[in-house]
């Protein structure tokens, strides 16, 4: 029960890594607001993890919706201890100059702007409490970029830099900010990263991961729980790989 009595928002939590993080948080005692554009999926996650979890439909790239999300969390929970910015999208693998402007804008809106929007609404609350933990889900793509995912790579590099900048600014206020860099996992985005989901493509992808498997929602949940718990009270500004050794 490492998060007993804590409250958390996890974005992009209807499935994949976000659902794994939300489930681990609830199992460790936290009350979780499960946020996703997919309301049915968010409700299913919330119902499955229990412990008073609630679901909310939010477009994390929309300032008004993020503001309403934060206000609902404050009203429901009384205080918010943990924010996990997990929601993310990618464009399909393609030469950088052929990615459409619409796809570029979508990647930057969800992967980058959303972190600014949640910070704008939630950081003042955490400052007033003198404590808080923010976790941004970046990617190994921000450390060791893959060809043909250029603008996705760049967005995750931004997340890593933003995490460090947030950490150094917010540390005096008692707020810790960290990031996780997962390697591709068994999530709905896997096919998008690979371009096509075939045994040959999976074998090629897995050959780049020394431990020889994809990451799982449970892997991310375990790492997220540690970084957001009091056990990691001296850790801030870290972008920790959960990648089976890919970035070595």
Image: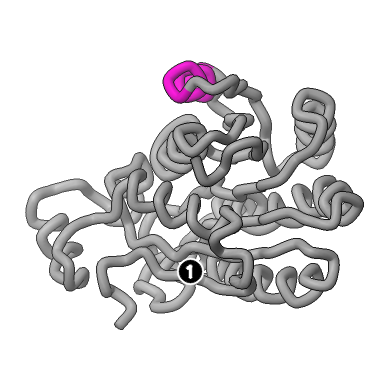
Assign the magenta stretch its main secondary structure: helix
Of residues 154 and 99, which is closer to you in this image? 154
Of residues 57 and 105, which is closer to you in this image? 57
Residue density around tag 1, few if under 14, some if 14–19, many if 20 or more, within 10 Å: many
* In the image, residue 181 above or below residue 133: below
Q: Is residue 183 magenta?
A: no
Where residue 210 appears, as percent x and y from the top left, is 17, 72
Q: Which residue is mark 1?
A: 153
Q: Is residue 44 magenta?
A: yes
* In the image, residue 219 above or below residue 18: below
- Residue 25 located left or right of residue 75: left
| Start-end of magenta stretch | 40-49
- Residue 78 located left or right of residue 12: right
Name the residue: 81% across, 47% down.
122
Of residues 26 and 140, which is closer to you in this image? 26
Q: Quadrant of the C terminus?
A: bottom left
Name the residue: 46% across, 53% down.
91
Name the residue: 58% across, 30% down.
34
Where residue 123 appears, as percent x and y from the top left, is 82, 54
- Residue 189 located left or right of residue 155: left
Asked which quadrant contains residue 54, the reply is: top right
Where residue 86 appears, as percent x and y from the top left, is 55, 48
Where residue 39 appears, as percent x and y from the top left, is 56, 20
Name the residue: 40% across, 75% down.
145
Asked which quadrant contains residue 79, the reply is: top right
């Amino acid at each position: 029960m490492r998060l007993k009595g804590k409250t958390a928002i996890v974005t992009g939590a209807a499935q994949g890594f976000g659902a794994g993080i939300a489930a681990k948080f609830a199992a460790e005692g936290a009350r979780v607001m499960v946020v996703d554009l997919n309301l049915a999926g968010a409700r299913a996650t919330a119902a499955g993890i229990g412990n008073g979890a609630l679901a909310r439909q939010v477009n994390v790239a929309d300032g008004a919706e993020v503001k309403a999300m934060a206000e609902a969390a404050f009203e429901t929970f009384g205080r918010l201890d943990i924010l996990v910015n997990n929601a993310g999208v990618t464009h399909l693998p393609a030469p950088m100059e052929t990615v459409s402007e619409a796809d570029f804008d979508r990647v930057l809106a969800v992967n980058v702007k959303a972190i600014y929007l949640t910070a704008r609404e939630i950081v003042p609350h955490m400052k007033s409490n003198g404590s808080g933990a923010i976790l941004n889900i970046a990617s190994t793509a921000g450390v060791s970029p893959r060809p043909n995912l250029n603008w996705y790579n760049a967005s995750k590099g931004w997340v890593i830099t933003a995490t460090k900048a947030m950490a150094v600014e917010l540390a005096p206020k008692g707020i810790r900010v960290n990031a996780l860099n997962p390697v591709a996992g068994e999530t709905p985005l896997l096919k998008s990263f690979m371009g096509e989901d075939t045994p040959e493509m999976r074998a090629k992808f897995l050959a780049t991961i020394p431990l020889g498997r994809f990451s799982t929602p449970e892997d991310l949940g375990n790492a997220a729980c540690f970084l957001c718990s009091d056990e990691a009270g001296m850790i801030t500004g870290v972008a920790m790989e959960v990648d089976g050794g890919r970035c070595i």
